[in-house]
Structures are given as C-alpha cells and as structure tokens.
Image: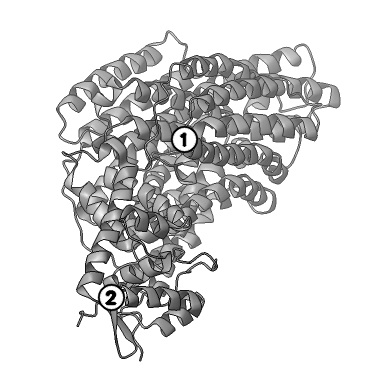
Amino acid sequence: MAQHTSAPAVPGEGHSQRTVLVAIGALLLGMLIAALDQTIVATALPTIVSDLGGLDHLSWVVTAYLLASTAATPLWGKLGDQYGRKRLFQTAIVIFLIGSVLCGIAQNMGQLIAFRAIQGLGGGGLIVLSMAIVGDIVPPRERGKYQGLFGAVFGGTSVLGPLLGGLFVDHLSWRWVFYINVPIGVIALAVIATVLHIPAHRTPHRIDYLGTALIAGVAACFVLMTSLGGVSYPWDSWQIVGFGVLGVVLLAAFVLVERRAAEPVLPLHLFTLRTFTLTAVIGFVIGFAMFGSMTYLPTFLQVVQGVSPTMSGVHMLPMVLGMLLSSTGSGQIVSRTGRYKIFPIAGTGVVAVGLLLLHQLDPSSSVAVMSAYFFVFGFGLGLVMQVLVLIVQNAVAYQDLGVATSGATFFRSIGASFGVSIFGTIFANKLGPRIADALAGQQLPPGIDPSRIAEDPRTVARLPADQATGVLNAYSISITDVFLYAVPVVLVAFVLAWFLREEPLRGSVTAPETSEVLSSNPVERSSHDECARALSKLGSLEGRKHIYEKITARAGLDLKPAASWLVLRIHRYGSVEPGLLAERSKVPLGVISEGVRQIEERHLAVREGLMLLLTDSGRETAGRLSAARQESLAEMLGDWWTKDRPTDLTELVKELTAELCGSDAEEPHNGDARTPMPHTPARTPRPPDHAK
C-alpha cells in the first residue's frame, strides 16, 4: 500500500491559510506606508515650504528620503538573511515610525530634511523585507499571486499619494502627511509580532558595510554639490569645490573596496557588460527626469495655476495613468514577442517630447492641455522603465541575476536624487532674479519683498493683481525651464538606447513586478529568489494553457490530461478518492471518471475501498511525467541550465516541479470539459483526499 502523505498547508508549510493572509496583510501595510511616503509629500511641498521657509532647499525633502532608502536597501536585504527577517522588519517599522513622528514635529527645513533621512532608512527596509518575507511563508507555486498584491500596492500608492497629500493639507495639516503612518505602522507591528512565524533559514553573509557607506557618501557629495552650488554658495567656493573633490576621492576608494569585497554591494565586473552599463546610464536619466519633474509639477499647479493641494493631486493622475498603461503593456509585449530594443528608444524619445511639452505650460494653460502633456510624459516613462529591468536580467549570468536586477534600479534611484537636486538648483537660481525683475521699481505692500516672495509662495496672494501676474509668470518660467534643461540629458539616453544589443530572451525572463518599476529604491533579491519568481509565474501561466497535454506528450505517454493529472496527484498525496475530489475541485465527475477509467485500464492505479493507489507502473509513469515537467522548467532557463549550474538552481527546479505537478490550480480536462481546477480546501495538513 502506498504511504499516505500530508499535503502542506496553503500557502506555506506550517502556516494556515488565515494566518498567512493576516501576515500578508500586515506586510502590505508596511509596504504601503513606505511606498506612500515616496509620493505623498510632493503635493504637500509648496505648503511645507510656505510654513517652514527654505524654498531653495525644497528638493532635499525628497532627496534625503531617496538617498537614505537607496543606500540602506542592500544592507537590509543581507542583514535579514543573516539575522532573521521578522526582527529586522519590526526594526524597520520602528525606525520609520520614529522618523515619521519627527518629521511631523519638525520646526524648520533643516530638521525636516534630517528626519526624512531617518524615515528613508526605515522605508528601504520595509520595502525589501516585506517582499522577501513572502518567500519565507509562501512556497514558489503560490508566490506569484501574493507578490502581485505588492505590485498593486505600489501602483495604488502612485495614484493615492498625491491625492492623500493634498487632502491632508487642505483639511488637516501638512504634518498629517507624516502622522498618518503611525497608526498604520503600529497595527502592522502588532500583527507581525503576533502571527508571523518565519522558519529560521539564515544565510551567512560578508556584508559590504564599507562599500555601502562609500557609495552613499559619493552620492551625497555630488548631490550636495549640485543642489547647493549657485544657491547657498558660489560655484567656485571652497565648499562646493570641496564636495566635488571629496566625491571623486570617495568614488576612487569605492572602486578599490569593491574589487576586494567578498560580496560587493555593486560588483564592478557587471560594467564589463555593455548592456548593463547602457541600461544603468539610461535608468539614471529616467530617474533624473521622473522624480525631478514629479517634485516640481505640484508646485507649478498650486502656485502658478492656483489649484488646491487636493486638486493638484488629481491633475497629476494622467501622468500616473500613462506610466502604468505603458509600463504594463510594454512588459507584456516584450515577454510575448521577445523584442525589446524599440521600447527604450521610443520611451526616451517620448519622454523628451513630454519634457518639451511641459516647458510650454504657462498660467493660462487649460486643464485639458495640462492633462494631455502629463499623459504623454508619463507614457514615455512607462515605456522604458519596465523594460530596462527585463533587459538586464536577460544579459547577465545566473549568479549575477539578483544583484544586476537591484543594480538596474539602484542607478535609477541615484538618478532620481540628482534629478531632484539639479532641478531644484535651476529653479532656485532662476526664481529670485526673475521675481526681482518683475517687481523692479514697484511699491510693494508692507512687510513684503522679492526675497520673501521667493521663500513663501503664499505671499503672492497679498500682492495687487498686476504685481501678482508678474510674480506668477516668474514662478511659471522658472519651473518650466527645469524641464527644458532636462531635455539634452534625456536625448543622451535616447542616443545610447540605439546601441543596446537585442539578444534572444530567455524563457524565464518575464516582465518584472510593478513594485520594481515604481519603487524608488532597489529591491534586493538573490538570484534564487528572482528565478523562483519568474519560473513560478511562468509555471502558473503554462498551467492555464493545458500543461498536462504538453508534459504528457513530452513524456511520450498516450494519456488524457485528466489521467496525467490524477497520476501526479496520487503520487504526490499517496491516494485520492475520485468522488470527494470531484466535489472539492468542482471538476465534473464525468471528466474525473474518464481519467480514473483510463489509469485503471492501463494498470497505473488500483482501488482499495474508495481510494485509488498507484501501482509500480503508475509510479514509473508519475516519475516520467515529473521528469517531463522538470525538463520544461529547465528549458525556460536557457543557458543558465548548464552542466556547471549552481546547486540552488537545481533544487529550485526540483521544488517547483513538485509544487506544480498535481496542483489544483491547473486545468486537467478532456476535449469536452473546460472547467478549470481552482484552489480547493484539499491542501490542508491532513491527507487531502481521504474520506472522514
């Protein structure tokens, strides 16, 4: 008699369905507040500046968060591997909440910038660890649908962020942009502490602390140089020159350290690959354009157009819509056709056109015109963002898959920091003199002068109509000029995109998740995790396209799909009761009966009471079907599946084969039945098909 085995709990070994769903909900809350803080601040910035002053340092409210989260992400990922992700995730929440409270009580711009950096340190951990914990509690077969939820959260925050930021400013206070994180974070912290139990699979690492600190220092020096130059200090001052020199020295030190590091934060040999280098530069430019513009468009809408913070968030929606539509569409097209070179070319070209259109905006621009311009700009960003990650994944060796994927996003993050700071420098340098020119020789109301108007946009409302018109034009031209200055940079990326080599796509390279596209910090995953994501996603898609027909043909067997499915299911769980299986899976009893009849006629299974058990011949057939499934997965890996392939890749394919073979999620049917096999309650800790 075959030994009855217990099916693992859905979706993770040792976790009930309800427990896992509650834990996933808490992880989503953590992801939500971290992702929200990348976008919610933008619409509140004009009000924050009016309250705290320091318009010339407005960009640093965004840059401080971006830099801190980007630098911290690789550390959070590896520390989680080494010391356990639950404890690290709780630590990240606490750091993020402390930063949020401090931001809410900040009394000047300097304090707010410093506290945003603290927030960013925690935010980077929330994003990377929440996605990694999914892999701890959910087996590969189920991972796709849960990770899809995280992508949906990122997509949702890109829409909700500007709207919520505006609502808080209009009806409460800009400080609630930060305070709102506290109740959400406390709930997530309590739920994680109570229900999340992660298996202790710790991976020792040689963490590259020095390399991480050096690359963060390099970025900070150059960002400080570009944001303070010509604003706080003259370009030829010792401070600005000092930042530049220090940045170069730290960069040289970083290169030396990375050559010798056991596990470098950014392996230098990746830059020997032309594709990686080109995508890094293109990603840098896209981050530069995207975050630079998203920071200053709300200022244009609120100050120049005079709309409320809430409505400025609504006006930004066409840009987000264009980005989501084109990123999703381009990723799907590339995955299906294998052709990708056209998208970076078209995307950078459309972004350049979008920036030129944004440069045409003025105080009289209509809502329809602005919406159209925003949509074009967002559509161009989406065309190139999704595909860059996919191109990098296709170009590197398996051992570099994880670090190359996060590296592609890393350069977009650094580009975002530079974009926000350089846009801010251009804006601050142009605004003051233009306001002074517009008001030259005019009598201003008491207590108002050009420098104060440049510091506090609310003072415009206190000016007479003719003076206000001149000041609004100064604001308008100063903001829209930054888009014009970004065009040459984007055109460089457009030219570089033509030099990308279009190589055949591996079967396992799929469109990345939305979180990878919209996240401003590089989500750190190992090569194993990245491959598991892609293969489980492809395995699920194949299952819906009659995988049993394919693996039966590959195994050289003459069986109906339902018969193959039954053989694999019996092999996995030890036995099945056909009647109970039909009741639970909602597959017509006739379809299952046909499969049962065939495997009994072929002597692949025998009855023992109500139960079906495999014969020796049936176990051999199940082995052939499993081997065929394993071969089909290995085929997707292409040149990663070589004789010297890593052990972890072999184990992953075996694990996925076991998960995918016999799963209820796939569609066993004959020519007449078209009813899919949904997930059923059969996969519980008891043998799933035993009669009580």
Q: Secondary structure at mark 2?
A: loop
Q: Which mark is residue 446?
A: none
Residue 90 makes an appearance in the image = no
Quadrant in which the N terminus is drawn: bottom left
Q: Of circles 1 and 2, which is in front? A: 2
Q: Which residue is mark 2?
A: 603
Please say if 165 is above or below 22. Answer: above
Residue type highlighted by circle 2: His
Residue 314 makes an appearance in the image = yes
Q: Residue furthest front?
A: 601
Q: Give the alpha-carbon distance from disc 1 to disc 2, as whole Å.
A: 78 Å
Please say if 692 is above or below 529. Answer: below
Q: Which residue is mark 1?
A: 110
Point out the tag, 1 or 2, that comes first from the N-terminus: 1
Marks counted in the figure total: 2
- In this image, 457 relative to 490: left or right? right
Residue 473: x percent and y percent?
75, 21
Residue 447: x percent and y percent?
71, 28
Instruction: Please tell me which residue lies in front, 595 or 138.
Output: 595
Q: Residue furthest right?
A: 465
Residue 440: x percent and y percent?
75, 12
Residue type highlighted by circle 1: Gly
Quadrant in which the C terminus is drawn: bottom left
Please say if 504 is above or below 3. Answer: above
In this figure, which colouring scheme has been used for the structure?
A: one colour
Please say if 19 is above or below 460. Answer: below
Instruction: Please tell me which residue lies in front, 13 or 443.
Output: 13
Residue density around tag 1, few if under 14, some if 14–19, many if 20 or more, within 10 Å: some
Residue at the image point whose x is 21% and y is 79% from the top: 2
